[in-house]
Image: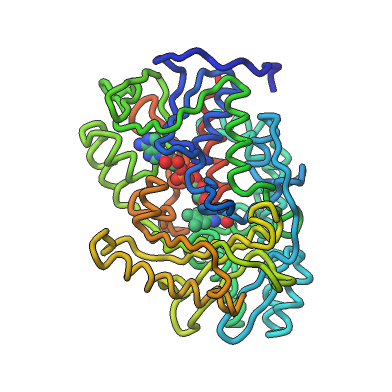
């Protein structure tokens, strides 16, 4: 790393080295790293709060995570989490609280505790199926072999251009040799790695864990994604940022600004300016323009290519293929403030499956719950907890007409029923209730149809890289390599920024 020192904020200007559209984790990582590498960078965020899907918001003293609450490796220097590596480069950190057990899975017929410690997790599974627990161990060993091999090449060193090959050959040759036997697994789905697993219960458990990571079951989830999560869970730590997901966003914003970058909020980009196939800058709603030879879009693939560019800016075939990328559904959200009296031994993450005869991906059937005030009591007023529950819900059919309020209540019902598995008298405890629909999700996160992200199944295509056919235009975030989730989008920001580093 060069010996740059933090620089003061730059004066107002209309010409930049790089403009980043969007302050999701992918955009902030790309912007902050480019600032760290000495570029004049501005990150333009449509909303008044930065962070995109990872932003926090406050109502009546309750601090809510709008999306992610499951993090890893923030308090462990050996973690493979790319986000953690970025924070190190920015000379920032986020205090975090490690915890284990992580929470509980509630199937209709049984509830099992989830542990990061694999021995404990397997003995919990063995209570239900001893042969299944032995099969699970075989799968874990395959995935951990991949994690160990990947560990030798840190994400922070990677780039998404041809310089990657000489870099790997010169700096990481022994690691590459170690990775060779694992190469078939890198291309595989988790489903491929568990073909010999017979136990239906364990197969369902792995499907569920894959679904929680990627929005797809084991056959659609790439093995490295699961390997990363299992490795971090068992070899590093699962931890929660003090102050909630917004604390991570704040650390990235601090890093951006410390290294001379600028964050502009309430700055909705309406158009990416392209001249003769080369990017020239952006135009905001209201008409103001900024110029830069590099523009990085953190908006989704669908939003970037339909909202921000004119159809004629892209080759027609490329545009049409990109826009056909399948999307995971959107969400119903329930954010609650509840009274905490008498709630002892509560764990923080819960996943409730209502009906074993329905697919786990069916809207309303699998409900995810986080209660982050069990780790950080300051997120709620004294003697209260903050609760976030969500489940998949299609965007289609939602509109703000006179049926909206009723429909919203009705669709929140599976979330309340899920919460009753964890806190039976939850409805009597509610002091603050916010229900979000796919329309809310799309509006507050500026995401096409409020989607969780692209549904690119393993073996059915690759997430695209940060490059686009327009010279100077790049993309980061969960519709680029390596995909959905905070560690993945942080990696996308690294790949993009490193590729632009001279
Ligand atoms: C409910 C939920 C729970 C999740 N739980 C977890 C979890 O526990 N752990 C985990 O690792 N991941 C989790 N994820 C996934 C993770 O949060 C996302 O994959 C990740 O945060 C997406 O980051 P991103 O960089 O793609 O950008 P986004 O978060 O999509 O941010 C993009 C930003 O760009 C802005 N923008 C868009 N268009 C414009 C424009 N025209 N002008 C200006 N700004 C614009 C948006 O306002 C937004 O701020 C969860 C996601 C959701 C929705």
In the image, taking residue 312 as reference, residue 327 lies left or right, namely: right
Q: Is residue 379 above or below residue 27?
A: below
Quadrant where the C terminus sits is top right
Q: Is residue 44 above or below residue 221?
A: above
Q: Position of residue 184 (x, y in %)?
A: 58, 56
Q: Is residue 242 visible?
A: yes
Residue drawn where x is 58% and y is 40% of the image? 249
Quarter of the rendering containing residue 204? bottom right
Residue drawn where x is 73% and y is 77% of the image? 124
Quarter of the rendering containing residue 126? bottom right
Q: Is residue 16 above or below residue 181?
A: above
Q: Position of residue 32 (x, y in %)?
A: 57, 29
In the image, taking residue 391 as reference, residue 231 lies left or right, namely: right
* Closest to the observer, 377 or 317: 377
Quadrant where the N terminus sits is top right
Residue drawn where x is 58% and y is 71% of the image? 429
* Closest to the observer, 342 or 166: 342
Residue drawn where x is 38% and y is 60% of the image? 437
């Amino acid at each position: 790393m060069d010996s740059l020192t933090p620089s003061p904020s730059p004066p107002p200007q209309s010409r930049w080295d790089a403009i980043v559209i969007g302050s999701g984790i992918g955009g902030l990582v790309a912007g902050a790293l480019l600032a760290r590498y000495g570029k004049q960078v501005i990150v333009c965020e449509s909303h008044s709060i930065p962070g995109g899907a990872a932003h926090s918001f406050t109502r009546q003293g309750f601090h809510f995570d709008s999306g992610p609450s499951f993090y890893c490796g923030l308090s462990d220097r050996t973690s493979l989490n790319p986000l953690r590596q970025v924070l190190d480069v920015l000379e920032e950190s986020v205090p975090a609280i490690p915890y284990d057990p992580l929470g509980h899975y509630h199937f209709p017929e049984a509830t099992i505790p989830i542990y990061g410690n694999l021995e404990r997790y397997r003995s919990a599974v063995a209570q239900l199926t001893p042969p299944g627990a032995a099969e699970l161990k075989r799968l874990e060993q395959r995935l951990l072999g991949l994690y160990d091999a990947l560990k030798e090449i840190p994400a922070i060193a990677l780039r998404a251009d041809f310089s990657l090959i000489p870099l790997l050959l010169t700096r990481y040759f022994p690691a590459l040799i170690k990775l060779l036997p694992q190469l078939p697994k890198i291309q595989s789905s988790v489903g491929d790695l568990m073909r010999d697993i017979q136990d239906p219960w364990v197969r369902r458990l792995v499907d569920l864990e894959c679904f929680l990571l990627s929005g797809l079951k084991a056959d659609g989830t790439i093995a490295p994604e699961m390997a990363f999560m299992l490795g971090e869970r068992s070899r590093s730590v699962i931890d929660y940022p003090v102050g909630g997901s917004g604390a991570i966003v704040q650390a990235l914003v601090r890093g951006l600004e410390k290294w001379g970058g600028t964050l502009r909020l309430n700055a909705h980009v309406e158009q990416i300016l392209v001249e003769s196939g080369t990017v020239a800058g952006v135009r905001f709603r209201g008409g103001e323009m900024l110029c830069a030879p590099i523009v990085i879009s953190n908006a989704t693939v669908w939003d970037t290519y339909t909202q921000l560019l004119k159809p004629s800016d892209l080759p027609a075939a490329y545009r049409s293929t990109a826009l056909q990328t399948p999307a995971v559904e959107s969400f119903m959200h329930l954010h609650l403030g509840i009274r905490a009296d008498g709630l002892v031994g509560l764990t923080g993450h819960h996943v409730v499956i209502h009906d074993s005869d329905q697919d786990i991906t069916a809207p309303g059937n699998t409900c995810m719950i986080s209660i982050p005030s069990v780790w950080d009591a300051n997120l709620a007023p004294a003697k209260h907890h903050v609760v976030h529950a969500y489940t998949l819900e299609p965007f289609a059919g939602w509109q703000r007409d006179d049926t909206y309020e009723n429909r919203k209540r009705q669709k929140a019902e599976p979330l309340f029923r899920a919460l009753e598995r964890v806190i039976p008298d939850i409805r009597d405890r509610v002091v603050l209730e916010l229900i979000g629909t796919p329309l809310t999700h799309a509006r507050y996160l500026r995401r096409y149809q409020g989607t969780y992200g692209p549904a690119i199944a393993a073996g059915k295509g690759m997430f695209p890289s940060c490059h686009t056919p327009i010279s100077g235009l790049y993309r980061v975030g969960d519709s680029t390599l390596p995909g959905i989730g905070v560690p993945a989008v942080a990696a996308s920001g690294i790949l993009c920024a490193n590729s632009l580093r001279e």
